[in-house]
Image (spheres, coloured by chain):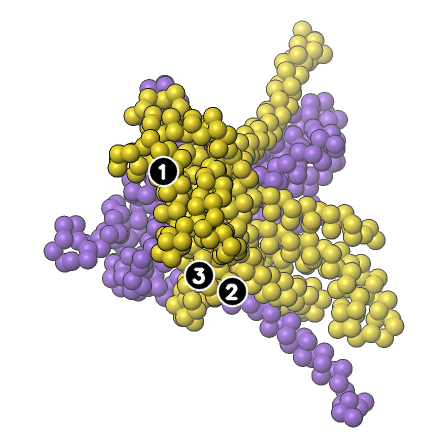
């Protein structure tokens, strides 16, 4: 066999190997992307339900006695008894009352506060049902399952069917999810408290890390002499960027809480910890932006007699600003999704009130997701997924903003 | 009136500005000093109560210290070996998933993919990196773990509902984009002349990649893998939500294990008296975590940097 024959003979095998190798690459990408798609759709399907909530139309009498006693839930119970006059035994009545959320009375109270002329009147009001009924309406609790296996009894289903026949029960947009704080009752829980906590933390984080990051980057790129000290700072920043986030939380706990005695669970401390964590990201991005400004700009400014500080402030910094902002937005997006360091400084408490300031106890969106994911109620799992949709929505918006900024202001010199 | 040429206001202002800039650049140093000092001080107090050797080599982890002295099992034991083993097991699973997927994705994107494909696929992979870890944790606990349990039952394996496998698999996907983007960078940094030389000798594309490009890019890829390993070790939310709480010394990926980060979170959330050995133990664990990730990072950054200098 001649040499070229031997090569010819091996060729088919080598081409097969080539194709296989290429296929591995495509498979790897397919695996990664299909995981992304599966994860996002699984969470999306689970979560969209939470944007709707089962409401029941009840004919409520704004009874003077109940209003005087501040017994708003009693008003709901009266309306329930009126809707089902045939329910008489105590046990059945108790089961009947449980169809409605314990927050239904609160809704009546707000209604009355807004419009005191309701006193003594009879109105048909849509009120939230309990979470089990909500799950039944959405099909998460299976009607066909054996009675012992589901959380809703046959009797309760019969009552709901009567409502269904009268069109007195339906899914409505779940406004409360966006306007309420946390709650033990899934149907009353909302993300506004966690959202405000995130907003306050991120404001602190931005106010600290943006100026600090940019000043550090300007110093390192434009002023610093090349010596051991600046080398040390550089190595330091690169290492800080890779330190696990939970370690920043430990730092916050030991230094901010136990040494400086700042309040626990406060967005102020959360923001400070997140600022330390995002600082390296911002510094690295800002330095890249400064490096992208060509030296000719600086030389022209020097040539006109500008000092070094003037050159940087008037020419280099404005030109590098879009790049710096892009890096900062990406850093903020990271900080928004971060939860581990916040667990360390106590931003995991159960907080019903919506925080109104930087030192009020608060949680953050990702921490709220973590807390809800731990709750056993089925309805909370739906709400967790919905909160994830909101969080990921914000992250996508921030990253898109960064991309648009980059496209809009990107300059090729 | 106060600003006169003789005052040299500009000089003073600029000196002040420079001073402020220098001061802000020390914040990064101060952060590191703060981390080291706080971890070290608290850990030293912990080692004052529990001997270092008991902590490093002990096989028993049950940090519940008793409220009353006569309680059963009142002396908490702080042997961290099960935690280290659990952390390594989950990280190893993650790397076993992420290394082939990330590396092959990087090779395909760098060597085969059309520019248009690359422009679409790269941002998609970056989305994976941008998703908060709490989302991965939710997915692992709610979808992957039950699915693994179900499949295991069908095949006849007893899979724990908080198995190391579920947390490891999902963590693997999380660190895949890190490996793929770092590998992509180093593969692109291999000079085209080396590929051309190989093609000239008659090698196919895959032969060129395997015999020329990958060996040349190997140090950089190793650096990327080390960085990914340090991410996996320090990852918190996925394991807090999907891995177990009880210390369990096992190499079986189907069982529940706990990790260093999970224990830090459980020790420090909820009610705590600050000076108990229990809370101080969290700082000792934090110190171990910081030191091990720091060593990995320093080696990785050194390798990556050294490698870059070769071809520039």
Residue at the (32%, 43%) spot, across then down? B245
Rendered hue of chain B is: purple
Question: Do callouts 3 and 1 mark residues in contact (Cβ within 8 Å)?
Answer: no
Examine the rendered structure and indicate whether residue A194 appears above or below residue A253.
Answer: above
Q: Position of residue B174 (x, y in %)?
A: 52, 39
The first of marks 1 and 2 along the sequence is 1
Q: Nearer the viewer, mark 3 or mark 1?
A: 1
Disc 3 secondary structure class:
loop
Residue at the (19%, 57%) spot, across then down? B67
Q: Disc 1 sits on a residue from what chain?
A: A
Quarter assignment of residue B287: bottom left
* Label 3 sits on residue: A361
Q: Which residue in the rendered view is the most extreme toward the left?
A: B70
* Label 1 sits on residue: A81
Disc 1 secondary structure class:
helix
Q: Is residue B301 left or right of residue A122?
A: right
Q: Position of residue A403 (x, y in %)?
A: 71, 47
Q: Which chain is yellow?
A: A
Query: For the residues marked 1 and 2, what is the alpha-carbon distance in whole angstroms?
Result: 43 Å
Q: Disc 3 sits on a residue from what chain?
A: A
Residue B105 can be seen in this image: yes
Query: For the residues marked 3 and 1, what is the alpha-carbon distance in whole angstroms?
Result: 41 Å
Query: For the residues marked 3 and 2, what is the alpha-carbon distance in whole angstroms?
Result: 9 Å
The first of marks 3 and 1 along the sequence is 1
Q: Which residue in the rendered view is the most extreme toward the top?
A: A1
Disc 2 secondary structure class:
loop
Q: Nearer the viewer, mark 1 or mark 2?
A: 1
* Label 2 sits on residue: A357
Q: Disc 2 sits on a residue from what chain?
A: A
Examine the rendered structure and indicate whether residue A247 appears above or below residue B82.
Answer: below
């Amino acid at each position: 066999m001649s040499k070229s024959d031997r090569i010819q003979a091996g060729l088919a095998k080598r081409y097969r190997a080539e194709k296989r190798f290429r296929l591995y690459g495509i498979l790897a990408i397919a695996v990664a992307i299909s995981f992304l798609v599966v994860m996002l759709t699984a969470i999306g399907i689970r979560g969209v339900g939470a944007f709707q909530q089962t409401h029941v139309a009840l004919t409520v009498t704004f009874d003077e006695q109940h209003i005087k006693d501040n017994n708003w839930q009693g008003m709901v119970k009266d309306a329930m008894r009126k809707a089902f006059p045939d329910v008489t035994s105590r046990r059945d009545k108790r089961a009947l009352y449980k169809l409605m959320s314990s927050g239904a009375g609160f809704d009546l109270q707000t209604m009355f506060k807004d419009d005191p002329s309701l006193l003594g009147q009879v109105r048909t009001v849509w009120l939230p049902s309990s979470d089990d009924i909500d799950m039944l309406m959405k099909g998460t609790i299976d009607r066909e399952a054996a009675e012992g296996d589901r959380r809703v009894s046959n009797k309760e289903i019969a009552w709901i069917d009567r409502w269904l026949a009268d069109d007195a029960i339906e899914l409505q947009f779940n406004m409360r999810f966006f306007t309420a704080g946390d709650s033990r009752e899934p149907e009353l829980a909302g993300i506004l408290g966690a959202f405000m906590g995130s907003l306050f933390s991120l404001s602190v984080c931005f106010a600290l890390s943006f100026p600090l990051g940019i000043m550090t980057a300007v110093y390192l790129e434009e002023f610093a002499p090349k010596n051991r000290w600046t080398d040390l700072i550089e190595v330091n920043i690169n290492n800080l960027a890779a330190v696990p986030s939970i370690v920043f939380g430990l730092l916050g706990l030991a230094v901010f809480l136990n040494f400086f005695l700042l309040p626990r669970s406060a967005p102020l401390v959360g923001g400070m910890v997140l600022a330390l964590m995002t600082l390296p990201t911002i510094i690295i991005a800002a330095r890249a932006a400064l490096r992208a400004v060509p030296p000719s700009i600086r030389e022209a400014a020097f040539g006109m007699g500008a000092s070094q500080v003037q050159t940087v402030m008037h020419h280099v910094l404005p030109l590098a600003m879009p790049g710096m902002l892009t890096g900062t937005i990406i850093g903020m997006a990271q900080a928004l999704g971060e939860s581990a360091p916040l667990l360390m400084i106590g931003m995991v408490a159960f907080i019903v009130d919506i925080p109104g300031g930087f030192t009020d106890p608060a949680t953050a969106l990702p921490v709220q997701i973590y807390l809800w994911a731990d709750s056993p109620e089925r309805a909370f799992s739906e709400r967790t997924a919905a909160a994830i949709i909101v969080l990921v929505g914000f992250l996508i918006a921030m990253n898109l903003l960064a991309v648009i900024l980059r496209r809009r202001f990107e300059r090729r010199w | 009136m106060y600003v006169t040429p003789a005052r040299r206001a500009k000089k003073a202002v600029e000196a002040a500005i420079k001073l402020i800039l220098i001061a802000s650049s020390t914040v990064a140093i101060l952060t590191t000093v703060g981390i080291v000092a706080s971890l070290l001080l608290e850990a030293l107090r912990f080692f004052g109560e529990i001997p270092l050797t008991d902590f490093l080599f002990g096989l028993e982890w049950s940090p519940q210290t008793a409220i009353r002295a006569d309680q059963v099992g009142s002396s908490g034991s702080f042997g961290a070996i099960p935690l280290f083993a659990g952390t390594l097991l989950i990280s190893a699973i993650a790397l076993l998933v992420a290394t082939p997927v990330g590396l092959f994705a990087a090779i395909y994107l760098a060597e085969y993919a059309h520019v248009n494909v690359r422009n679409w696929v790269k941002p998609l992979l970056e989305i994976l990196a941008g998703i908060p870890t709490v989302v991965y944790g939710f997915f692992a606990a709610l979808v992957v773990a039950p699915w693994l349990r179900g499949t295991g039952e069908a095949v006849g394996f007893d899979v724990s509902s908080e198995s190391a496998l579920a947390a490891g698999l999902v963590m693997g996907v999380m660190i895949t984009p890190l490996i793929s983007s770092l590998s992509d960078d180093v593969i692109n940094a291999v000079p085209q002349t080396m590929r051309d030389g190989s093609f000239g000798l008659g090698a196919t594309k895959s032969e060129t990649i395997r015999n020329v490009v990958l060996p040349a890019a190997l140090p950089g890829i190793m650096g990327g893998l080390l960085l990914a390993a340090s991410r996996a070790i320090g990852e918190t939310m996925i394991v807090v939500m999907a891995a177990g709480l009880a210390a369990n010394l096992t190499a079986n990926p189907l069982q529940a294990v706990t990790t260093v980060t999970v224990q830090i979170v459980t020790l420090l959330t909820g009610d705590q008296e600050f000076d108990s050995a229990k809370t101080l133990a969290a700082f000792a664990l934090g110190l171990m975590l910081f030191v091990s990730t720091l060593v990995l990072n320093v080696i990785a950054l050194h390798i990556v940097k050294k490698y870059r200098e070769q071809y520039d």
